[in-house]
Amino acid sequence: MIRRKLLATMLALVGTTLAGACFAQASVTFTKPVKLIVPFAPGGTSDILARMIAPKLSLTLKQTVVVENRPGAAGNLGASIVAKSDPDGHTLLLMDLSSLAVAPHLYTTLTYNPVKDLAPVSMISFSPYLFAVNPKLGVKTVAELLAYGKKNPDKLVFAHAGIGSGNQIVGLELAKHWGIQWVTVPYKGGSAAINAVLAGEANVIVNGSTATLPYVKNNQLVALAVTGDKRFDSLPNVPTYGELKLPAADSGSWQGVLVASGTPAPVIAKLNAEINAILKDPEVVARISSQGAKPVPMTPQALAKWMQESSVNFGKVIRENNLKIE
Protein backbone atom coordinates (compact mmCIF):
# COMPACT_ATOMS: atom_id res chain seq x y z
CA MET A 1 0.00 0.00 0.00
CA ILE A 2 2.83 2.40 0.94
CA ARG A 3 4.60 1.66 -2.36
CA ARG A 4 1.40 2.33 -4.29
CA LYS A 5 0.90 5.66 -2.56
CA LEU A 6 4.54 6.59 -3.16
CA LEU A 7 4.27 5.64 -6.83
CA ALA A 8 1.04 7.61 -7.18
CA THR A 9 2.66 10.64 -5.57
CA MET A 10 5.72 10.39 -7.88
CA LEU A 11 3.54 10.07 -10.96
CA ALA A 12 1.50 13.06 -9.86
CA LEU A 13 4.67 15.11 -9.41
CA VAL A 14 6.00 14.03 -12.81
CA GLY A 15 2.66 14.88 -14.41
CA THR A 16 2.64 18.29 -12.77
CA THR A 17 6.23 18.95 -13.92
CA LEU A 18 5.51 17.88 -17.48
CA ALA A 19 2.33 19.92 -17.57
CA GLY A 20 4.24 22.94 -16.26
CA ALA A 21 6.97 22.46 -18.87
CA CYS A 22 4.43 22.15 -21.68
CA PHE A 23 2.61 25.26 -20.49
CA ALA A 24 5.89 27.18 -20.27
CA GLN A 25 6.81 26.15 -23.83
CA ALA A 26 3.37 27.06 -25.11
CA SER A 27 3.67 30.54 -23.61
CA VAL A 28 7.01 31.24 -25.36
CA THR A 29 6.73 33.57 -28.34
CA PHE A 30 9.42 34.91 -30.65
CA THR A 31 8.91 38.60 -31.26
CA LYS A 32 11.47 39.35 -33.97
CA PRO A 33 13.50 37.60 -36.70
CA VAL A 34 15.84 34.88 -35.48
CA LYS A 35 19.50 34.81 -36.48
CA LEU A 36 21.07 31.41 -37.07
CA ILE A 37 24.82 32.04 -36.92
CA VAL A 38 27.09 29.64 -38.83
CA PRO A 39 30.71 30.40 -37.86
CA PHE A 40 32.10 28.95 -41.09
CA ALA A 41 32.03 29.87 -44.76
CA PRO A 42 29.06 28.91 -46.99
CA GLY A 43 29.01 25.40 -48.42
CA GLY A 44 30.32 23.50 -45.41
CA THR A 45 28.47 20.97 -43.27
CA SER A 46 27.19 23.53 -40.76
CA ASP A 47 25.98 25.83 -43.53
CA ILE A 48 24.21 23.02 -45.40
CA LEU A 49 22.35 21.93 -42.25
CA ALA A 50 21.48 25.49 -41.24
CA ARG A 51 19.89 26.23 -44.62
CA MET A 52 18.03 22.93 -44.46
CA ILE A 53 16.56 23.64 -41.03
CA ALA A 54 15.99 27.42 -41.17
CA PRO A 55 12.86 27.42 -43.39
CA LYS A 56 11.12 24.81 -41.26
CA LEU A 57 12.10 26.55 -38.04
CA SER A 58 10.68 29.78 -39.46
CA LEU A 59 7.30 28.10 -39.82
CA THR A 60 7.21 26.67 -36.31
CA LEU A 61 8.50 29.83 -34.58
CA LYS A 62 6.35 32.06 -36.82
CA GLN A 63 9.35 34.31 -37.40
CA THR A 64 11.89 34.63 -40.19
CA VAL A 65 15.04 32.63 -39.46
CA VAL A 66 18.03 34.16 -41.23
CA VAL A 67 21.27 32.21 -41.72
CA GLU A 68 24.37 34.38 -41.22
CA ASN A 69 27.86 33.11 -42.04
CA ARG A 70 30.50 34.55 -39.70
CA PRO A 71 33.70 32.57 -40.40
CA GLY A 72 36.96 32.97 -38.56
CA ALA A 73 39.24 31.43 -35.92
CA ALA A 74 37.96 27.87 -36.42
CA GLY A 75 34.43 28.90 -35.47
CA ASN A 76 35.36 30.96 -32.43
CA LEU A 77 34.47 34.31 -34.03
CA GLY A 78 30.85 33.31 -34.67
CA ALA A 79 30.60 31.48 -31.36
CA SER A 80 31.76 34.61 -29.54
CA ILE A 81 29.06 36.67 -31.28
CA VAL A 82 26.34 34.32 -30.04
CA ALA A 83 27.87 34.09 -26.56
CA LYS A 84 27.66 37.89 -26.25
CA SER A 85 24.17 38.20 -27.75
CA ASP A 86 20.99 38.95 -25.80
CA PRO A 87 19.97 35.77 -23.94
CA ASP A 88 16.48 35.64 -25.39
CA GLY A 89 16.73 32.80 -27.92
CA HIS A 90 16.68 35.07 -30.98
CA THR A 91 20.34 34.39 -31.83
CA LEU A 92 21.30 30.75 -32.39
CA LEU A 93 24.63 29.11 -33.10
CA LEU A 94 24.88 26.08 -35.40
CA MET A 95 28.33 24.58 -35.73
CA ASP A 96 30.58 21.55 -35.45
CA LEU A 97 30.66 21.18 -31.68
CA SER A 98 34.11 19.58 -31.75
CA SER A 99 35.57 23.07 -32.20
CA LEU A 100 33.92 24.21 -28.96
CA ALA A 101 35.30 21.17 -27.13
CA VAL A 102 38.79 21.94 -28.46
CA ALA A 103 38.89 25.71 -27.91
CA PRO A 104 39.41 25.90 -24.12
CA HIS A 105 42.42 23.56 -24.33
CA LEU A 106 44.01 25.09 -27.43
CA TYR A 107 43.66 28.86 -27.08
CA THR A 108 45.49 30.70 -24.30
CA THR A 109 43.06 33.60 -24.68
CA LEU A 110 39.43 33.36 -25.75
CA THR A 111 36.90 36.19 -25.91
CA TYR A 112 34.26 33.83 -24.48
CA ASN A 113 33.99 30.69 -22.38
CA PRO A 114 32.24 27.86 -24.28
CA VAL A 115 30.97 26.28 -21.06
CA LYS A 116 29.91 29.38 -19.15
CA ASP A 117 28.75 31.62 -22.02
CA LEU A 118 26.84 29.17 -24.22
CA ALA A 119 23.85 26.97 -23.39
CA PRO A 120 23.17 23.70 -25.28
CA VAL A 121 19.87 23.37 -27.15
CA SER A 122 20.09 20.21 -29.25
CA MET A 123 22.40 18.04 -31.30
CA ILE A 124 21.52 18.15 -35.00
CA SER A 125 23.44 15.41 -36.76
CA PHE A 126 26.54 13.29 -36.94
CA SER A 127 28.45 12.73 -40.15
CA PRO A 128 31.58 10.56 -40.23
CA TYR A 129 34.80 12.03 -41.56
CA LEU A 130 35.87 11.08 -45.05
CA PHE A 131 39.62 10.82 -45.55
CA ALA A 132 40.07 11.87 -49.17
CA VAL A 133 42.69 13.03 -51.66
CA ASN A 134 42.95 14.88 -54.94
CA PRO A 135 42.72 12.38 -57.84
CA LYS A 136 45.89 13.86 -59.41
CA LEU A 137 47.86 12.44 -56.51
CA GLY A 138 47.40 9.06 -58.18
CA VAL A 139 46.63 7.04 -55.03
CA LYS A 140 43.51 4.98 -54.34
CA THR A 141 44.27 3.39 -50.97
CA VAL A 142 45.79 4.38 -47.65
CA ALA A 143 48.73 2.04 -48.34
CA GLU A 144 49.42 3.80 -51.64
CA LEU A 145 49.23 7.19 -49.92
CA LEU A 146 51.79 6.14 -47.30
CA ALA A 147 54.10 4.79 -49.99
CA TYR A 148 53.78 8.09 -51.87
CA GLY A 149 54.50 10.05 -48.70
CA LYS A 150 57.70 8.13 -48.00
CA LYS A 151 58.98 8.66 -51.55
CA ASN A 152 57.92 12.30 -51.66
CA PRO A 153 58.61 13.93 -48.26
CA ASP A 154 56.81 17.24 -47.69
CA LYS A 155 54.66 16.87 -50.83
CA LEU A 156 51.56 15.87 -48.91
CA VAL A 157 49.56 18.99 -48.01
CA PHE A 158 46.75 18.45 -45.51
CA ALA A 159 43.89 20.99 -45.65
CA HIS A 160 41.62 21.46 -42.65
CA ALA A 161 38.82 23.73 -41.42
CA GLY A 162 41.03 25.91 -39.22
CA ILE A 163 43.47 25.70 -36.36
CA GLY A 164 41.69 24.00 -33.51
CA SER A 165 39.10 22.29 -35.68
CA GLY A 166 38.20 18.66 -35.04
CA ASN A 167 39.51 17.54 -38.43
CA GLN A 168 42.88 19.18 -37.76
CA ILE A 169 43.15 17.16 -34.55
CA VAL A 170 42.33 13.96 -36.45
CA GLY A 171 44.97 14.86 -39.06
CA LEU A 172 47.57 15.23 -36.31
CA GLU A 173 46.61 11.86 -34.85
CA LEU A 174 46.91 10.17 -38.27
CA ALA A 175 50.32 11.70 -38.98
CA LYS A 176 51.60 10.60 -35.57
CA HIS A 177 50.15 7.10 -36.02
CA TRP A 178 51.83 6.64 -39.41
CA GLY A 179 55.05 8.45 -38.50
CA ILE A 180 54.79 10.71 -41.54
CA GLN A 181 55.13 14.44 -42.12
CA TRP A 182 52.67 16.53 -44.06
CA VAL A 183 52.21 20.23 -44.40
CA THR A 184 49.02 21.31 -42.63
CA VAL A 185 47.19 24.36 -43.96
CA PRO A 186 44.24 25.95 -42.11
CA TYR A 187 41.24 27.37 -43.99
CA LYS A 188 38.10 29.22 -42.92
CA GLY A 189 35.85 26.19 -42.75
CA GLY A 190 35.48 22.79 -44.34
CA SER A 191 34.16 24.08 -47.67
CA ALA A 192 37.23 26.30 -48.13
CA ALA A 193 39.46 23.33 -47.32
CA ILE A 194 37.64 21.19 -49.89
CA ASN A 195 38.01 23.91 -52.52
CA ALA A 196 41.74 24.05 -51.80
CA VAL A 197 42.09 20.32 -52.46
CA LEU A 198 39.95 20.54 -55.60
CA ALA A 199 42.15 23.41 -56.87
CA GLY A 200 45.38 21.55 -56.10
CA GLU A 201 46.54 23.95 -53.36
CA ALA A 202 46.41 20.96 -51.03
CA ASN A 203 45.99 17.26 -51.77
CA VAL A 204 44.72 15.57 -48.57
CA ILE A 205 41.65 16.28 -46.45
CA VAL A 206 39.64 14.85 -43.56
CA ASN A 207 36.16 16.36 -43.53
CA GLY A 208 32.52 15.66 -42.70
CA SER A 209 30.70 13.46 -45.18
CA THR A 210 27.78 15.91 -45.56
CA ALA A 211 29.98 18.42 -47.36
CA THR A 212 32.51 15.99 -48.85
CA LEU A 213 30.48 13.08 -50.22
CA PRO A 214 29.12 14.92 -53.31
CA TYR A 215 32.67 15.54 -54.56
CA VAL A 216 33.58 11.89 -54.07
CA LYS A 217 30.50 10.83 -56.01
CA ASN A 218 31.47 13.23 -58.82
CA ASN A 219 35.01 11.78 -58.89
CA GLN A 220 36.50 15.13 -57.89
CA LEU A 221 37.92 13.55 -54.75
CA VAL A 222 39.04 9.99 -54.00
CA ALA A 223 37.87 8.61 -50.65
CA LEU A 224 40.45 6.39 -48.94
CA ALA A 225 38.70 5.73 -45.62
CA VAL A 226 35.67 6.68 -43.53
CA THR A 227 35.55 6.95 -39.74
CA GLY A 228 33.57 4.39 -37.79
CA ASP A 229 33.12 0.65 -38.07
CA LYS A 230 30.31 0.56 -40.62
CA ARG A 231 30.85 1.14 -44.33
CA PHE A 232 28.84 3.74 -46.23
CA ASP A 233 26.01 2.29 -48.30
CA SER A 234 26.91 4.80 -51.00
CA LEU A 235 30.65 3.99 -50.77
CA PRO A 236 30.70 0.24 -50.13
CA ASN A 237 34.30 -0.20 -51.36
CA VAL A 238 35.79 2.39 -49.02
CA PRO A 239 37.25 0.80 -45.86
CA THR A 240 36.52 2.14 -42.39
CA TYR A 241 38.97 3.44 -39.81
CA GLY A 242 37.99 0.44 -37.72
CA GLU A 243 39.06 -1.99 -40.44
CA LEU A 244 42.34 -0.14 -40.95
CA LYS A 245 42.90 0.17 -37.19
CA LEU A 246 43.36 3.92 -37.42
CA PRO A 247 43.15 6.31 -34.45
CA ALA A 248 40.13 8.58 -33.90
CA ALA A 249 37.87 5.89 -35.36
CA ASP A 250 34.76 7.37 -33.75
CA SER A 251 35.48 10.96 -34.78
CA GLY A 252 33.32 12.96 -37.14
CA SER A 253 31.35 16.13 -37.56
CA TRP A 254 28.94 16.56 -34.64
CA GLN A 255 26.65 19.47 -35.44
CA GLY A 256 24.54 21.16 -32.79
CA VAL A 257 22.67 24.30 -31.78
CA LEU A 258 23.42 26.54 -28.81
CA VAL A 259 22.27 29.92 -27.47
CA ALA A 260 23.69 32.51 -25.10
CA SER A 261 23.93 31.43 -21.49
CA GLY A 262 21.15 32.90 -19.40
CA THR A 263 18.49 32.21 -21.99
CA PRO A 264 15.32 31.24 -20.05
CA ALA A 265 14.75 27.50 -19.68
CA PRO A 266 11.28 27.63 -21.34
CA VAL A 267 12.82 29.28 -24.42
CA ILE A 268 15.52 26.61 -24.64
CA ALA A 269 12.87 23.91 -24.16
CA LYS A 270 10.76 25.43 -26.94
CA LEU A 271 13.72 25.55 -29.35
CA ASN A 272 14.71 22.01 -28.42
CA ALA A 273 11.20 20.68 -29.03
CA GLU A 274 10.84 22.42 -32.40
CA ILE A 275 14.31 21.45 -33.66
CA ASN A 276 13.90 17.83 -32.57
CA ALA A 277 10.54 17.69 -34.33
CA ILE A 278 12.18 18.98 -37.52
CA LEU A 279 14.85 16.28 -37.22
CA LYS A 280 12.09 13.65 -37.25
CA ASP A 281 10.50 15.08 -40.41
CA PRO A 282 10.80 12.33 -43.09
CA GLU A 283 11.98 14.87 -45.68
CA VAL A 284 14.75 16.15 -43.41
CA VAL A 285 15.75 12.63 -42.36
CA ALA A 286 16.01 11.61 -46.02
CA ARG A 287 18.08 14.66 -46.97
CA ILE A 288 20.50 14.23 -44.07
CA SER A 289 20.80 10.48 -44.68
CA SER A 290 21.47 10.98 -48.40
CA GLN A 291 24.60 12.93 -47.43
CA GLY A 292 26.01 10.14 -45.31
CA ALA A 293 24.90 11.64 -41.99
CA LYS A 294 22.22 10.84 -39.45
CA PRO A 295 19.98 13.06 -37.30
CA VAL A 296 20.88 12.94 -33.62
CA PRO A 297 18.27 14.89 -31.62
CA MET A 298 19.15 15.29 -27.94
CA THR A 299 17.89 16.98 -24.83
CA PRO A 300 19.91 20.02 -23.68
CA GLN A 301 21.12 17.99 -20.70
CA ALA A 302 22.36 15.11 -22.87
CA LEU A 303 24.16 17.54 -25.17
CA ALA A 304 25.83 19.23 -22.19
CA LYS A 305 27.13 15.84 -21.03
CA TRP A 306 28.38 14.99 -24.53
CA MET A 307 30.27 18.28 -24.77
CA GLN A 308 31.89 17.74 -21.39
CA GLU A 309 33.10 14.25 -22.35
CA SER A 310 34.34 15.45 -25.75
CA SER A 311 36.28 18.27 -24.10
CA VAL A 312 38.12 15.75 -21.92
CA ASN A 313 39.01 13.56 -24.93
CA PHE A 314 40.19 16.42 -27.15
CA GLY A 315 42.14 17.96 -24.29
CA LYS A 316 44.18 14.76 -24.00
CA VAL A 317 45.14 14.84 -27.70
CA ILE A 318 46.03 18.54 -27.57
CA ARG A 319 48.30 18.05 -24.55
CA GLU A 320 50.00 15.04 -26.16
CA ASN A 321 50.80 17.16 -29.25
CA ASN A 322 51.78 20.26 -27.26
CA LEU A 323 49.36 22.45 -29.17
CA LYS A 324 48.74 26.04 -28.10
CA ILE A 325 47.55 29.17 -29.85
CA GLU A 326 48.22 32.62 -28.42
Image (spheres, rainbow, N blue to C red):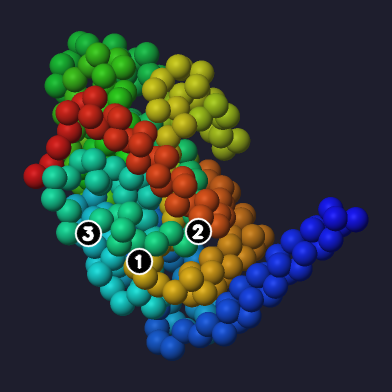
**What residue type is disc 1 on?**
Ser
Q: CA distance from mark 2 to mark 3?
A: 20 Å
Vertical relation: 230 (above or below) 220: above
Residue 34 visible in the shown view: yes
Label whose residue precedes the other's in the sequence (2 or 3): 3
Q: Secondary structure at mark 3?
A: loop
Q: CA distance from mark 2 to mark 1?
A: 12 Å
Vertical relation: 126 (above or below) 236: below
Do residues under tags 3 and 1 come within 8 Å of each other at their CB atoms? no
**What residue type is disc 2 on?**
Pro
Which residue is most to the left?
326
Q: Which residue is mark 1?
A: 261
Q: Which residue is mark 2?
A: 300
Vertical relation: 107 (above or below) 23: above
Position of residue 131 in the picture relative to residue 322 (left or right)? right
Q: Residue at x 35, y 66 (%)?
A: 261
Position of residue 220 in the picture relative to residue 172 (left or right)? right
- The spot of residue 255 in percent (x, y) is 43, 52
Q: CA distance from mark 3 to mark 1?
A: 11 Å
Residue 200 visible in the shown view: no
Q: Secondary structure at mark 1?
A: loop
Q: Residue at x 39, y 62 (%)?
A: 119
Q: Residue at x 13, y 45 (%)?
A: 108
- The quadrant of the image that shows the N terminus is bottom right
- The quadrant of the image that shows the C terminus is top left
Q: Residue at x 17, y 33 (%)?
A: 323
Q: Nearer the viewer, residue 285 or 30?
A: 30
- CA neighbours of label 2 inside 10 A, class few (<14), some (14 to 19), many (20+): many
Location of residue 129 (image quadrant)? top left
Position of residue 284 in the picture relative to residue 43 (left or right)? right
Label whose residue precedes the other's in the sequence (3 or 1): 3
Residue 112 numbered mark, or none: 3
